[in-house]
Image: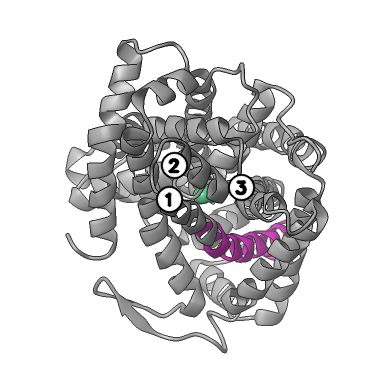
Amino acid sequence: MSAREQWSSRTAFVLAAVGATVGIGNIWRFPYLVGEYGGAAFILVYLGCLAVFGLPLMIAEVAIGRRSRLNPVHGFRYLATETSGSPAWLLAGLMGIVATLCILPLYSVVAGWTMAYLVRTASGILVGVTGDGARSIFNALISDPEKLFGWHTLFIVSLTLVAARGVRQGLERAVRVLVPGLFLILLSLLAYSWGGDALQRALDFMLAADFEAVTMAGMLAAMSQAFFTLSLGMGALMIYGSYLPGDASIIRSTASVVLIDTLMAIMAVLAVFPIVFSSGLSVAEGPGLVFQTLPVAFGRMGGGMILGSAFFLLLLFAAWSSGLSLMEPAVAWLVESGVLGRGWAAVVVGLIVWLLGIGVVMSFSAWSFEFTFADEVRTGGLFDVLDILSASILLPLGGLAVALFAGRTLSRKLMAEEIGGGEGLGFWVWYGLIKYVVPVGVVVILLRAVGGI
Ligand code: PHE
């Protein structure tokens, strides 16, 4: 086998990891959660969760990846046997890969909605649309398998092409364009939104710090959002860490990633809220915010076509660079098992995800079915099944596995060596968090997700 590839620099890693972490979660989920749960108060709780759970877990994942220099399945097994742990730890890696294969089809279908909306805003179809109109347009789209099928195929083929070209020629080149692109689009949206007086209303809303709106449900939502937005618990950051050059500081790199991810989420809120407020609409409408409320706002404003197109392009870039990180663990696993070359590995993974995605495409039409999970009736067929399985079950379990592995199975000395900087105060804070605090937090998220609390 040829030598294993690495990122060309620490910056390349940070770009790729920012691409992985800044996703639909930042641009869609975070703004509606902030709207729903009380502005700045929610953000404060969220920042706390990032510091206490998110960053320590990300450090652990990246360190495990770099220490093993392998894909998650082989990586867990190799490090476990090296430190006389059980080889069954490879199941943790396998679980991560299953999680990526569950999330990717969802991501692909939502990216498909995004592409459809990009075309619609750019072509002016949505100019002057009413609230009811926007709702029925959205429902017509998600129950139209023919349209979704084409977008889904396009998204998966484009990811496969990049994954087939490897770490430097594929992933690194893509994120070098996508991530600065993301940042520039966000900046221009911000600049535009800040022109009007709606900015003041958005800031007033944000800064009202309505601590009463941060209920128990809000705190748990902040915690799982911290987890989801950092792409933790599925080996995506582990595989990216496994390509990190040996002399790069893990703490500095991961801290930059968390900082930029947070910045982009807050920028998204500051761009979206004024747009919504300036049309006299509400930001507290939940998941409908992006595909149902925003189109109405864009449809009412001058320049809405351009602004709307920029927004959906932003969402598409974010989904695309996250999609790349979701392909990589499975592709690297197949390659490092010695079964397939990179090109074929990418094709096989792409094909599996594409097939699963067909089920998701049909979830709101022919193949929709109803079931109850955690006392909630869900009607979205395979879409909801994969969503629950990944975000509510596999991701927290994966996070728990990483915390237990880094904090208990691997020795403290080994982790200190890999993270660097010796066993100073910072290391002990990290160690205490990963050993005691993170596992408890993750179990709470898990129990909450399955309706246990
Ligand atoms: N972090 C991504 C987001 O915020 C979601 C994601 C999770 C992407 C896991 C890849 C892996 O949307």
**Quarter of image, res 193:** top right
Residues in magenta? Answer: 99-127
Residue with the mark numbered 3: 322
What's the CA distance linking mark 3 and mark 1? 26 Å
Q: Residues within 10 Å of mark 2 (few under 14, many from 20)?
A: some
* Rendered view: 254 above or below 166: above
Q: Mark 1 near ligand 1 (CB under 8 Å)?
A: no
Q: Amino acid at mark 3?
A: Ser
* Sequence-earlier tag: 3 or 2: 2
Of badges 3 and 1, the one in the foreground is 1
Residues at marks 3 and 2 touching, judged by CB atoms closer than 8 Å: no
Find residue 321 and report its horizontal and vertical position in percent: 66, 45
Q: Position of residue 281 (x, y in %)?
A: 43, 54
Label 3 element class: helix
Which labelled disc corresponds to residue 89?
Answer: 1
Seen in the picture, residue 186 relative to 452 is either above or below; the reply is above
> Residue at position x 60%, y 53% from top?
298
Are the residues at dot 1 and dot 2 in contact (C-beta closer than 8 Å)? Answer: yes
Q: Which mark is residue 17?
A: none
Which residue is under mark 2?
Answer: 80
Q: Within 10 angstroms of label 3, few (less than 14), some, or many (20 or more) residues?
A: many
Q: Are marks 3 and 1 in contact (CB under 8 Å)?
A: no
Q: Residue at x 61, y 35 (%)?
A: 69
